[in-house]
Image (cartoon, coloured by chain):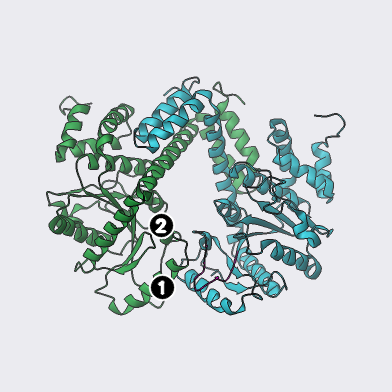
Chain colours: A cyan, B green
Amino acid sequence: MAATVHQPTVDELYEGVRSGNRALIGRAITLIESRNLKHQDKAQLLLEKLLPHAGGAQRVGISGVPGVGKSTFIEGLGSWLIDQQKKRVAVLAVDPSSGRTGGSILGDKTRMEKLSANKDAFIRPSPSAGVLGGVARATRETIIVLEAAGFDVVLVETVGTGQSETMVSDMVDFFLVLMLPGAGDELQGIKKGILELADMVAVNKADIFEKKIKQAVREYKSALHIMTDASPNWHPPVITVSGLTGDGVPDLWERIEKHARIMSENGERAARRNEQRVSWLKSQIADRLLADFHSDTAVHQAFGPMLEDVRNGKKPVSSAVSDLLKLYHSKGYRGL
Amino acid sequence: MAATVHQPTVDELYEGVRSGNRALIGRAITLIESRNLKHQDKAQLLLEKLLPHAGGAQRVGISGVPGVGKSTFIEGLGSWLIDQQKKRVAVLAVDPSSGRTGGSILGDKTRMEKLSANKDAFIRPSPSAGVLGGVARATRETIIVLEAAGFDVVLVETVGTGQSETMVSDMVDFFLVLMLPGAGDELQGIKKGILELADMVAVNKADIFEKKIKQAVREYKSALHIMTDASPNWHPPVITVSGLTGDGVPDLWERIEKHARIMSENGERAARRNEQRVSWLKSQIADRLLADFHSDTAVHQAFGPMLEDVRNGKKPVSSAVSDLLKLYHSKGYRGL
């Protein structure tokens, strides 16, 4: 560590976050994102202090394929929440494909120029490229920081590919899926599984493709109609919205608030958050055990060739598993 | 081991399986299902010998909620395959909720009385209740045994709840979902995610609910229409079938064979099997590492209270993970 940069203490970070100091909020998040073991110990102490002050925000996940207009929509929604609803709004991103400077999602703040200049907004790009589990961990802990800093709404943007949706839906209270009306007769490019996660579908760019809207809404409604709802108290609505003009944004937010009211009153929201923490704990343990396994030199050397033999059907899976675990355990007390 | 029962050697089992000896096939499967470590070593040797002779069957997963008529359908399909197509047919089940004697699925062989009496059929209930990963492992390895024994078709039945569908779809070439036409205007009880796995949807009991059929077919087609197909070369069809009368069974099988032809020719079938083996290897490693973790006495004692603190938001997840891993590693060489 260079002596020229003062490293704030845990107490300084805590006070800074609690008083809403933007620079120290940023430093706290950087600490949480660090893979340095000393930083991680410090981050844990900080999180333990902040945790009692967390939990107050409306956490909304926002997903949609590239091109659906997420940035424009989030800028519009965020500005409206600040100007009309007097909310303080934080925007995070989960995009394992993108480094801090990658720019594919939120990387270029100028994409949300208006919002990022607002004193009641806080925008943070995706943690630098790494395993998805690590990116998700940092984002979950960043939500704790932002809630302890008093933000009322945390929007978590994710690009509509891969497993990142599942992870984001597992850290928010409400999962919003932005959809494009189909380019032709068919609705294209809907990722498998994405509708299952949706608490609401919003068909975006209503102003551009006006003619296709009704058909798109009908088809999404029909698809959601035959799926079992995750909650007996909420059927995901399908609405239209325009990120560009802001049409539909008040209706959209009203539904998110209605969802929050219903789920808070009947206890489902607390239960969802509790289960999210439990599943997070379990996945973190599994991730750490696997990371330790793969960091073993003998395992590392044997794994590639063994994987190929399994892939090609030359070696039974159970034999490969057994061989690899014997290698892993050979140095420790956990002999088979 | 009691001296009164002769334990067949690996070579005896191998010869027995290869020659289609039903008693020895059964013994081989029992060996594979055993959790006894000595048995597992023996099972590995057997699988290594059998593996070069495996891979020849059409592997079909069949899923559907209880009440959809899976047993009747499988009995009808199996009998038809044997009588009309001169196939040898094996039927397995994956049902982690059911012990060998539980009876909720295939447990009672009389449910498939006709098929189980057929010399060209082999029916095996789900391995006894246990973790799903273990049940799935045994079933995958049982497929190897049955293929080495010369069965042409392996049907893997699974009950339409929980994660068992995903696991079964990950061990077969073709995943068939049986559906009931809706009782009212709506189609009820469709498990989230099940349609995404389907290579075909068959609306069952076409003879009973004739009036509802067309609407059901239309709605499933519409739902599948807006989902991205897993393969560019196959769009999951929606057909009707009657397990009771056998109506639709030849059409159903013809489509499964067509799928097999297309996917074999373009290499997707081999690729799917290769990826299935890789994902099986990875999940087995993760399962074993987690089992070892939870078998640690110190971890075992601390886990429950720690989980509660995490669930209730009293302890940050990262702290709990860190504490638990320190406990786990404290006795071994893998100190943090």
Residue drawn at point x = 75 percent, y = 42 percent: A30
Q: Helix, strand, or loop for circle 1?
A: helix
Instruction: Give the total of numbered labels.
Output: 2
Q: Residue pushed farthest right?
A: A4
Q: Which of marks 1 and 2 is nearer the N terminus?
A: 2
Q: Name the residue under label 1.
A: B219
Residue drawn at point x = 26 percent, y = 30 percent: B49
Q: Position of residue B116 (x, y in %)?
A: 16, 52
Residue drawn at point x = 62 percent, y = 49 percent: B312
- Stretch of the chain drawn in magenta: A178-190
Q: Mark 2 points at which residue?
A: B197
Q: Quadrant of the C terminus of chain B?
A: top right
**Does the segment drawn in magenta span residue A186?**
yes
Considering only vertical position in the picture, is B132 above or below A262? above
Considering only vertical position in the picture, is B71 above or below B27? below
Q: Helix, strand, or loop for circle 2?
A: helix
Q: Main secondary structure of the magenta part?
A: loop
Q: Quadrant of the N terminus of chain B?
A: top left
Q: Where is residue B15 in the image (x, y as percent from the top left)?
A: 17, 32
Checking the image for residue A27, the label placed there is none
Left or right of residue A176: residue B2: left
Q: Where is residue B227 in the image (x, y as percent from the top left)?
A: 47, 64
Relative to the observer, which residue lies in front, B130 or B61?
A: B61
Chain identity of mark 1: B
Considering only vertical position in the picture, is B175 above or below B282? below
